[in-house]
Structure formats: structure tokens, C-alpha cells
Amino acid sequence: MRFIVFVKATKNSEAGVMPSQELLAAMMKYNEELVQAGVMLGGEGLHPSSKGVRVKFSGSKRIVTDGPFVETNEIVAGYWLWQCKSKEEAIEWVKRCPSPMPGEESEIEIRPLFEADDFGAELTPELREREEQLRAQAAGKK
């Protein structure tokens, strides 16, 4: 099972406060453990929402809103993409994570990714083939 693991933003991360050398070292060690265990497929930290935009879809209209965004608890400060045997395994890995926002209360959210089989008959063999081709094409461009 694949999971996306979101590190939620806090007041400090949204203010652009950079992590300490100690936190960077602890996260590097943690990421190394994830990679060595075959869990981590990718991950990155994100700039504050003040550097981002949101695009709202309303019928045929597209409304672009510049950041920053008000609700800090709805903003993502970083993410990992993991491959785990189960949600329980992902939870155990998150419990081992260094506190991502020292000195602040913080939260990490775990969400499973859809796999092709989750879409059932709606994902026809033709669509499945096109999707596989796109994944292969995207992987080849790295």
C-alpha cells in the first residue's frame, strides 16, 4: 500500500522559520532509516503558503488566490510518499518521527493513495494502459 504522509504547517513554518541544524540532522537520520527499510519513495518540505496560490474551480471559471492562507491547520508544510504493508505500519513509522516542529504542537496526517484496482470497472483496460504508459513516461523523464 502506498501512503502520502503530510506534515501539517504551524505558525512558525508559515512564518518561514527554518529548521535547526539539529532537526535537519534528526530528519536526515529518520529519512535514511525509511529508505533503508524500503518505505520512503519520496518526500519534500514545502515553502510557506505565502509563496503559493490556490485555484478554485467553479463551473468553467478558474479563480486564482495568492497565499498566504488563513487556516494554518489546513496547510501542508511537507510530505513523504511511502510504501508500507499496512496503515498500521505507516502509523508505527510516524510514531518514530522526530517532532517536525519543535517547541510547537504539530500534526502528521497519513492518507492512503488510490491504486488502479480501487477504481473498479470505471478504469477500463484502455484507460489502465494509458495510465501505465503515462507513469512510465513520467518516470523516464527524471
Image: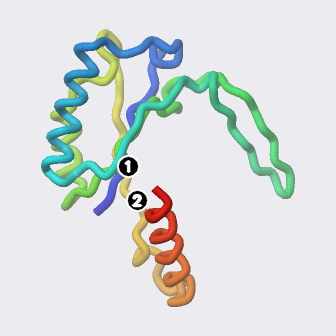
- The crowding category of the residue bearing disc 1, from other C-alpha atoms within 10 Å (few below 14, some 14 to 19, many at least 20), is some
Question: Taking 27 as reference, is 81 above or below it?
Answer: below
Three-letter residue code for mark 1: Ile
Circle count: 2
Cβ–Cβ under 8 Å for marks 2 and 1 = yes
Badge number at residue 113: 2
Color style of the picture = rainbow
> Secondary structure beneath disc 1?
strand
Find residue 16 and report its horizontal and vertical position in percent.
50, 14
Three-letter residue code for mark 2: Leu
Q: Residue at x 38, y 49 (%)?
A: 4
Q: Nearer the viewer, residue 79 or 91?
A: 79
- The crowding category of the residue bearing disc 2, from other C-alpha atoms within 10 Å (few below 14, some 14 to 19, many at least 20), is some
In the image, taking residue 134 as reference, residue 114 lies left or right, namely left
Question: Taking 12 as reference, is 5 above or below it?
Answer: below
Q: Nearer the viewer, residue 42 or 103?
A: 42
Query: How far apart in space, not on screen, are marks 2 and 1 (Cα)?
Result: 7 Å
Question: Taking 93 as reference, is 37 above or below it?
Answer: below
**From this viewpoint, which residue is outermost toward the right?**
61
Badge number at residue 4: 1
Q: Nearer the viewer, residue 58 or 7?
A: 7
Question: Taking 27 as reference, is 141 above or below it?
Answer: below
Find residue 121 and report its horizontal and vertical position in percent.
50, 87
Find residue 2 and report its horizontal and vertical position in percent.
32, 59
**From this viewpoint, which residue is outermost toward the front?**
141
In the image, taking residue 127 as reference, residue 106 lies left or right, namely left
> Secondary structure beneath disc 2?
loop
